[in-house]
Image (cartoon, rainbow, N blue to C red):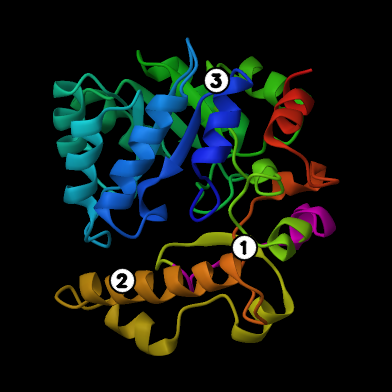
């Protein structure tokens, strides 16, 4: 989770028996990313596993360097999103790293399977952040029937009953994010964590004002003030084939900075990314306790 996941969270996740993952963009420099990889390898318990998320499209200008560092240092898996995973799969497999790819429909799931992905992460319409348009049952059920690689369901998991549902749809595992925002170890403000306790599923809205791709956020007064649609200028420029790439990169940069400010310090510009599964978040807890609530 952007800005939320960190070494402490993933270490506690591994100790609790689940795999943890950190967005590479959580680190400003490649040196910081390398240090995190080394620390996680040192903390890794026997049988534990950890990975990193990579945004693999052109909006992430750090992508190539991040991939190189991850492959040099090593981890158990990489999760790709928002672009073609072809180069990531090639380089990661050379380093003995598995690659799981976010997909939102069968078309892209078939593409990543053809490229050699080790699993498809079925991002449904209940996911936090960037989400798909299909329900968990529709998407997971379809992919589990049509693909030969494992399907991991992402979105809509806030309690053990939700996990059981996803498995019944054909998933071989689940990807869970939003319930862990309100964890003791999360690297965000207490205000962000408390918001995940105070707000619920009905308070989640889609916005185009962060990355250029629709993204779910908590409908705070500030989000209501700025609106959730792209500006008329962005709308016009996004229709220009030559300019839309640059417009998206600029929007991505501006949006990520705004999200970082809201996550890291108190501000009235509260743009907090979360999914509807915060409905089940009732208090701020250690990671190990959240895992226990999800699995028992």
Using the numbered discs, state the Cα–Cα distance from disc 2 to disc 1 in whole angstroms.
Answer: 19 Å
* Residue 285 in sight from this viewpoint: yes
Judged left or right of residue 131, residue 224 is right
**Quick one: which residue is furthest to the bottom in this view?**
233
- Highlighted range, magenta: 195-210
Using the numbered discs, state the Cα–Cα distance from disc 3 to disc 1 in whole angstroms.
Answer: 25 Å
**Pointer 2 residue:** 248
Element type at marker 1?
strand
Residue under the point 70% across and 27% down: 291
Residue under the point 59% across and 28% down: 13
How many residues crowd around disc 3 within 10 Å: few (fewer than 14), some, or many (20 or more)? some
Find out whether residue 202 is within the magenta segment: yes
Residue under the point 63% across and 54% down: 274
Judged left or right of residue 60, residue 233 is right
Please tell me which residue lies in front, 85 or 137.
85
Q: Earlier in the sequence, mark 3 or mark 1?
A: 3
Give the label on residue 173, or none: 3
Q: Please state the horizontal and vertical placement of residue 69, each as a whole percent of the image.
A: 21, 41
Quadrant placement of the C terminus? top right
Give the label on residue 116, or none: none
Please tell me which residue lies in front, 21 or 36.
36
Find out whether residue 246 is within the magenta segment: no
**Pointer 1 residue:** 217
Please tell me which residue lies in front, 209 or 198.
198
């Amino acid at each position: 989770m952007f800005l939320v996941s960190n070494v402490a969270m993933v270490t506690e996740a591994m100790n609790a028996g689940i795999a943890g993952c950190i967005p590479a963009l959580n680190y400003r420099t490649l040196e910081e990313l390398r240090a995190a990889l080394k620390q996680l390898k040192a903390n890794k318990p026997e049988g534990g596993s950890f990975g990193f998320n990579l945004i693999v499209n052109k909006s992430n200008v750090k992508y190539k360097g991040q991939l190189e560092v991850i492959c040099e240092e090593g981890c158990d898996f990489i999760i790709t999103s928002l672009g073609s995973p072809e180069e990531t799969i090639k380089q990661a497999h050379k380093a003995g790293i598995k690659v799981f790819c976010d997909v939102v429909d069968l078309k892209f799931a078939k593409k990543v399977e053809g490229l050699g992905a080790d699993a498809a992460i079925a991002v449904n319409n209940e996911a936090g952040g960037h989400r798909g348009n299909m329900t968990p049952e529709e998407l997971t059920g379809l992919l589990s029937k049509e693909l030969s690689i494992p399907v991991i369901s992402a979105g809509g998991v806030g309690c053990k009953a939700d996990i059981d549902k996803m498995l019944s749809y054909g998933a071989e595992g689940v990807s869970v994010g939003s319930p862990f925002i309100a964890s003791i170890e999360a690297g965000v403000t207490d205000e962000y964590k408390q918001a995940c306790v105070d707000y619920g599923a009905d308070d989640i809205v889609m916005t185009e004002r962060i990355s250029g791709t629709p993204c779910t956020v908590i409908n705070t007064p500030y989000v209501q003030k700025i609106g959730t649609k792209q500006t008329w200028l962005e709308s016009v420029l996004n229709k220009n084939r030559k300019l839309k790439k640059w417009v998206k990169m600029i929007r991505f940069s501006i949006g990520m900075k705004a999200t970082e400010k809201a996550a890291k310090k108190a501000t009235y510009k509260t743009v907090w990314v979360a999914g509807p599964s915060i409905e089940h978040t009732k208090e701020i807890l250690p990671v190990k306790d959240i895992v226990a609530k999800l699995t028992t």
